Structures are given as structure tokens and as C-alpha cells.
């Protein structure tokens, strides 16, 4: 048993077993328990409360002494905050090498689309991954996994999409599964064969979509390597018609849709995602009142990826309008080698506050509770709730919980606890 006492504040407390994402004013309504304690038994959050309850009466003192005597480890969190671990619902964590040369192209003025047309971008990562062994991919991905854990992340969705062939897509998904088995991260996997059109199908995109539908999806599903299916529905990548065919095929095999939508243009991706009941539509830089209304009336979560918007120097989506319309908004990193080489969810929360004018409360809950909803783990993760899995982090001493997104480069995560065990 781990007993954490004298916590300055316990952030993201939720008494109920709610599994629906937070919307509108709910997103800003974040419960904070001051001067608190937490008990972890096994891999579960067993109980929590206020220190005053343990110290003001004789019965309270007895309870405090009983907790301390039972504890295998006591953590004194004086001056520190405890948060639920981040839930990062959109990443490309499995890839080979890096693409800093494209970073230089970007500095010289080339756009993301121009770099892709020159054979860079996703296709660059495809070639690197093809020439990298599965074990080497695991080694590289584990380094990134360890990095994001130290940032306070406890759950992560990992997409394929740098394979673009059956063999290499399966290789990526196996690596993602191994990250879930060989690290304490909770990992959800997504098949993203429709990330780009490989060079062997240049000028014949429909034939590649046929390969995804007829060859890739059946094998991915039969081997149980993915929970979700995704596509990059965007000009220069996959059309609404392509994506419609892919989702229709994926659903027949039990794969739940997610979607890269409206990143570069008003692509129609939001409309298609809502039509198919996608768990989330992600990016959304190009959205307006029509998309906000559709999302508000649906169960599809709007997942914003401010790190990619920042890196690509684009206009940020209007998160405030989405929230006011009643859409469910989540935050994720989009950690990848081309448009967001960053897995720090705290930085995403900071960008959300600075560039999209979310309040700290909204940003924190979008990156924890709603992120958990966007990857179907909210029954276990995303809040401080008795009975949920003990995934949390303890900060260094801070003045307030708002200090976390405010001081966006200061290393503030001190202790990470995943599945009831202290990491590292």
C-alpha cells in the first residue's frame, strides 16, 4: 500500500463513474480537494480525503496512524499537487529515425504539402521504417515511451501508418502492442494504412485503397492488432469517398473509426466522421459553425493537436467556439517525426491556454478525462476516482495548479505512479 499525505491539492477528483466526455461549462468545472491524502492498494486508487479529517479528532488520529502503519511506502507531498496521469489519445509513437532535414526545409519556407510532394514527409518515414527491424523499432519506441511517462503520461494511443504495406503495417502494430506489454503505459492501437499513398501506387490511389480494404484490414483484424481504424482525409491524401470505403470495410471487422480531419482544408472529414460515429475527429484547424454544430450533436470527440499546429505555424482551431457549441474537446500530442516531435502533454495544455484560450481547468480535463474518453479507457483512467487504476503524478512544490501550464518549460513532474507502482 502507498499512502500519499499532506497533498497541497488533489486535482481532477471525480466521485461518479461517469464515462461520457465533458462538454460546455462542465469542462471548466474541475474538482480540487485541498490538503488531501490518497491511498493506493495494488493497482487501484483505494481512497482519498482531506487531511483535516485525520487530524482534528481522536478517531481521525487513529485512522491516520492505522494508514501509516499499514503503508509499505509513505510519500509526504507537502506543497505538491497530485494530478491524474495524462491520457494522450493521438500519437505516431512508432517510427524510425527522425526528419530534422525537413525541419530545415520548413525554415527555408517549404510547406508541409510541398515537402510531401518532393518525396519527404510521411513517405520519408515509410522508407526508414521498412529498413528497420522490429526489435530496433521497439528499442526506439521504448525510449519515447519512457520520455512521455516522465512527462506524466499514463495512457497513449499509437497509430500505424509509416508502413503502407501489409508487412510493415503489421510490424508497426506489433511494436505498438509490445510497448503496452513491456512498459507500464496503457496502449491503444490504431490501423492507419490510409496515411499516404505509397510510391508503388503513384497515380493509382484507388488501387491502394482496394489493397487496404481487401488485404490489410482482414489481416489486421484477424490478428487482433488494432482497436481503431483511421485515415488522413485531406486534399492530397485521401478523399471523403476513399475514407468512406475504408471505414465501411473496417466496421465490418469491428474496427472503430477515428479520423485525421480538416487539418489543411475544409475537407468534409468532420461530416464523414460524425456519419460513421467516429470515436474522435482530430486536428480540426479548418472548422466552422457547421462543424461545431455537428460535433455538438454527436458522440464524436473533437481532439485538438496544438503541438502540430504550433510546429507547422498554422492558425489554431477555434476551441472556444467548439466548447460553447457543446462539442466534447480533448487534447493530444500527435507525437511524430514530421509535424510534432514532442510528446509533452503539459506543453499541449500550455499551448491550449495560450493559443486557443482554454482555461487551465479546461485544458487539464481535456488532456485527462476527455482524452481517456477518446481512447475508451475512461472507466479506468482520466480522473482521481476511487476504484480507478492508480495512474497519477506528483508535482514538485508549486503555488497553484495553474502554475503547471503557466511555467511550460520548468520540469515540474516529480513522481509518476502507473498501475499503482512508482515509475523509475
Image (cartoon, rainbow, N blue to C red):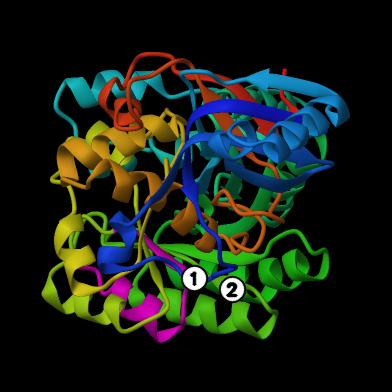
Q: Residues within 10 Å of mark 2 (few under 14, many from 20)?
A: many
How far apart are labels 1 and 2 at the CA level?
7 Å
**In magenta segment, residue 236:** no
Q: Nearer the viewer, mark 1 or mark 2?
A: 1
Q: Quadrant of the N terminus?
A: top right
Which badge, 1 or 2, is on the more N-terminal residue?
2
Given contact means CB atoms under 8 Å apart, are the residues at marks 1 and 2 in contact? yes
Q: Position of residue 319 (x, y in %)?
A: 20, 56
Q: Position of residue 312 (x, y in %)?
A: 23, 36
**In magenta segment, residue 268:** yes
Residue for badge 2: 256
Residue for badge 1: 279
Residue range (magenta): 266-283
In this view, the residue in front, 30 or 344, is: 30
- Is residue 338 toward the left or the right of residue 62 in the image? left
Q: Is residue 158 above or below residue 106?
A: below
Give the quadrant of residue 407. Answer: top left
- Is residue 360 toward the left or the right of residue 274 in the image? left
Q: Position of residue 216 (x, y in %)?
A: 68, 66
Q: Residues within 10 Å of mark 1 (few under 14, many from 20)?
A: many
Give the quadrant of residue 37. Answer: top right
Q: Tell which residue pokes out farthest to the front in this image.
A: 58
SS label for mark 2: strand
Residue 289's tag is none
Give the quadrant of residue 286. Answer: bottom left
At 35% from the left and 32% from the top, the residue drawn is 401
In this view, the residue in front, 105 or 224, is: 224
Q: Position of residue 416 (x, y in %)?
A: 63, 27
At 61% from the left and 69% from the top, the residue drawn is 211
Q: Is residue 94 above or below residue 209?
A: above
SS label for mark 1: loop
At 22% from the left and 47% from the top, the residue drawn is 358
Amino acid at each position: 500500500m502507498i499512502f500519499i499525505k499532506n497533498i497541497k491539492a488533489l486535482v481532477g477528483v471525480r466521485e461518479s463513474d461517469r464515462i461520457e466526455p465533458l462538454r460546455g461549462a462542465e469542462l471548466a468545472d474541475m474538482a480540487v480537494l485541498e490538503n488531501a491524502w490518497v491511498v493506493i492498494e495494488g493497482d487501484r486508487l483505494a481512497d482519498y480525503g482531506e487531511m483535516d479529517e485525520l487530524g482534528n479528532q481522536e478517531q481521525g488520529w487513529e485512522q491516520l496512524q492505522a494508514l501509516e502503519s499499514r503503508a509499505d511506502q509513505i510519500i509526504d507531498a507537502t506543497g505538491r499537487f497530485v494530478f491524474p496521469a495524462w491520457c494522450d489519445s493521438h500519437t505516431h509513437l512508432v517510427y524510425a529515425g527522425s526528419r530534422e532535414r525537413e525541419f530545415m526545409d520548413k525554415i527555408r519556407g517549404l510547406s508541409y504539402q510541398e515537402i510531401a510532394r518532393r518525396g519527404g514527409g510521411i513517405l520519408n518515414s515509410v522508407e526508414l521504417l521498412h529498413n528497420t527491424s522490429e526489435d530496433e523499432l521497439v528499442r526506439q519506441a521504448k525510449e519515447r515511451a519512457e520520455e512521455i511517462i516522465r512527462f506524466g503520461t499514463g495512457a497513449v494511443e499509437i497509430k500505424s501508418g509509416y508502413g503502407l504495406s501489409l508487412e510493415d503495417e503489421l510490424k508497426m502494430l506489433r511494436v505498438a502492442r509490445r510497448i503496452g506489454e513491456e512498459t507500464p503505459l496503457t496502449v491503444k492501437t490504431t490501423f492507419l494504412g490510409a496515411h499516404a499513398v505509397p510510391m508503388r501506387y503513384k497515380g493509382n490511389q484507388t488501387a491502394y485503397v482496394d489493397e487496404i480494404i481487401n488485404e490489410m484490414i482482414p489481416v489486421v483484424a484477424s490478428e487482433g492488432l488494432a482497436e481503431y481504424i483511421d485515415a488522413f482525409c485531406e486534399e492530397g491524401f485521401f478523399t471523403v469517398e476513399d475514407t468512406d470505403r475504408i471505414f465501411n470495410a473496417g466496421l465490418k471487422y469491428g474496427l472503430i473509426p477515428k479520423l485525421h480531419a480538416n487539418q489543411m482544408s475544409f475537407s468534409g472529414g468532420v461530416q464523414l466522421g460524425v456519419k460513421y460515429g467516429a470515436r474522435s475527429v482530430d486536428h480540426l484547424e479548418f472548422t466552422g459553425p457547421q462543424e461545431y454544430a455537428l460535433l455538438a450533436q454527436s458522440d464524436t470527440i473533437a481532439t485538438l493537436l496544438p503541438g502540430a499546429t504550433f510546429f507547422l505555424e498554422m492558425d489554431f482551431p477555434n476551441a472556444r467556439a467548439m466548447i460553447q457549441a457543446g462539442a466534447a474537446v480533448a487534447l493530444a500530442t500527435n507525437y511524430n517525426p514530421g509535424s510534432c516531435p514532442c510528446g509533452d502533454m503539459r506543453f499541449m495544455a500550455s499551448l491550449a491556454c495560450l493559443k486557443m484560450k482554454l482555461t487551465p481547468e479546461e485544458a487539464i480535463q481535456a488532456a485527462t478525462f476527455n482524452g481517456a474518453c477518446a481512447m475508451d479507457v475512461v472507466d479506468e483512467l482520466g480522473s482521481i476516482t476511487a476504484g480507478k487504476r492508480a495512474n497519477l503524478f506528483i508535482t514538485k512544490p508549486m503555488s497553484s495548479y495553474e502554475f503547471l501550464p503557466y511555467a511550460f518549460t520548468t520540469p515540474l513532474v516529480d513522481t509518476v505512479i502507473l498501475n499503482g507502482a512508482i515509475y523509475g
